[in-house]
Amino acid sequence: MDTVVDSIGQVRARIDALRARMCAHGVSTWIALSSDPHLSEYLPAHWQSRQWLTGFSGSAGTLVLTEEFAGVWVDSRYWVEAQAQLAGTGIETVRASSALGTALFDWLAGNVANGSDVGVDGTCLGLSVARSLEAALQKRSARLRTDLDLPNEIWPSRPPLPDAPVVERRRALESLDRSEKLTKVREQMASIGAQWHWISSLDDIAWLLNLRGADVPYNPVFLAHVLIGPADVQLFIAPGKVAAPLRDTLRSDGVQIQDYSRAAAALGALAPGGALLLDPRRVTLAMAQSVPPGVRIIEQVNPTILLKSRKSESELANVRLTMEQDGAALCDFFVWLEQALARRERITELTIDEQLTAQRARRAGFVSLSFGTIAAFNANGAAPHYSATAASHAVICEATACGDGLLLIDSGGQYETGTTDITRVIAIGQVQAEQRRDFTLVLKAMIQLSRAQFPRGTRSPMLDALARAPIWAAGIDYGHGTGHGVGYFLNVHEGPQSISPHLSPDPPTAMEAGMITSNEPGIYRPGCWGVRIENLLATVPAATGEFGEFLKFETLTLCPIDTRCIDRSLLRDDELAWLNDYHAMVHERLSPWLSGAALDWLQRATRPL
């Protein structure tokens, strides 16, 4: 039987079943989030209810279901993908051109039935989002119900919680030990009068305790909550995930292991009269509601957010070595690709993913990919978060002929010494003049941000326009942000900085030395092609004078940019000089790791223009 029809039938049946449960509970509208109790970006299968209900696999998107309507709100990264995956299901793709939450709240305020009940799982609803949602519903005198998990009532084979073991980081790889990190957090707690601090965000917990896990795809984190007190720390984690020797080590640092299921009860047991620090953007409504009325809540950004974003000199040194390993793996991959194309081997987007992953796996310290590889040929590159599948993918080359155009590859690796994220666009066969123009405009944008110098404390969203300026000048724009923070063998997307027009320029978004941020402008032409070029940048000191401290960027990523895709007439001399200098650095840093055909390829790929 046709698998697509089966999938559509399954989706329709699940939506019908959910509507029946809504009716049974007196709920007129149900909101299915892409979220979990830790407000993670990438979710364990247990909490992927929105994907299970709709068949849409994107990492971001919100389902709204009423008796008459079903729609998934998605931002520009997923417009094309959602449209394709939801076709025929009866679920509408709602394209949010503004911030995803704002677009959704505006719709609810205009469409929810007056005086009705709107349901959402409160254990997966962020506290700050809940407040905005309640404000929108008040315009319709609607009530928000957060005590239900309706998908669980119709999900007979719901995956269990992951149970991967937790491991300790080698001390040599961390600039601060566990007790030093706890001391820094407690100092910030004391400065605002907080006796306790609650953390649910998984990367913050992993960083703070110098632990890593494998509960979430692509991110080396584990399911847990943490309660920091004046003298002890309670780590709420599933039984069996922490081996006895590590449990003893943690106990010696004042960290007590508690059952994961006891987290909310521990908050409820806090003594009245004290103060609790929590981050409303990183804690759920259900957890916040567990805090007793007599405990004063102090709402601020988790101290760990900024602390872990500022990598130390020793950590940056490890990241630079990681970039050499990752860059060498990419060179080996591009040699394979060049030779396979010459031999007219069958190459698909899936083949690209397999070969690139295999090359990374051969490199020292490799643990896993840092996200699902995006290998997108021609029109598929127009979907920023495209994902090839066995049922739907493009063929790049086969015995009879190879294609012509642009191959976009966005990929990354998790190494013990750092996290990588890189995008390159490769010429396959003949490249059109219009494709070269788009590629060169994106390159100009990437160079412009790479060369930026700015006062310390500049809010990261303010830098976004620097990259867009060359693209805007051509009357073009792109829907996603230009850059995101990157962790140190942690989440490939981390805060507080984000070079994006969709982020409010609040004080925590200020750029500081030691931050690692992506630089990835793009141009996307639906049905034709997509271009995105991405390097990772480290924020480093630039100068100090009468106007204060200034920062600049150091390019960390080491991989040639395909000069076959460049329209030389569009590059200024200073931009060409930047590109040649970058390629000279790439050649110098990667040459010691390569030999034979890979070294020959590197020499050709980094030849000055």
Image: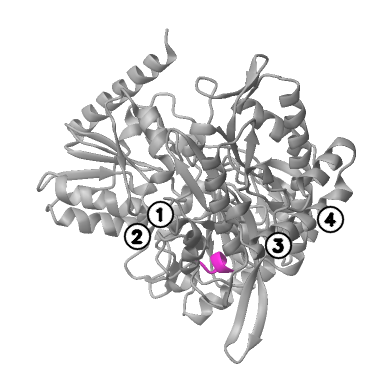
The residue at which mark 2 appears reads as 128
User: Which mark is first along the chain, 3 or 1?
Assistant: 1
Magenta residues, start to end:
302-306
The answer for how far apart the CA atoms under marks 3 and 2 are is: 46 Å
Residue kind at label 2, given as amino acid type: Ser
Q: Are marks 3 and 2 in contact (CB under 8 Å)?
A: no
Looking at the image, is mark 3 or mark 2 nearer the viewer?
3
Residue identified by numbered label 4: 588
What distance separates the C-alpha of mark 1 from that of mark 3?
A: 26 Å
**Amino acid type at image mark 3:** Ala
Secondary structure under tag 4 reads helix
Q: Nearer the viewer, mark 2 or mark 4?
A: 4
Circle 2 — which element?
Answer: helix
Work out which residue is located at the far front of the displayed protein and give it.
569
Relative vertical location of residue 332 with respect to residue 542 in this rendering, above or below: above
Which secondary structure, mark 1? Answer: loop
Towards the viewer: 550 or 118: 550
Question: Which mark identifies residue 475?
Answer: 1
Distance (Cα) linking label 2 and label 4: 48 Å
For the residues labelled 1 and 4, the Cα–Cα distance comes to: 37 Å
Q: Position of residue 448 (x, y in %)?
A: 58, 63
Sequence-first disc among 4 and 3: 3
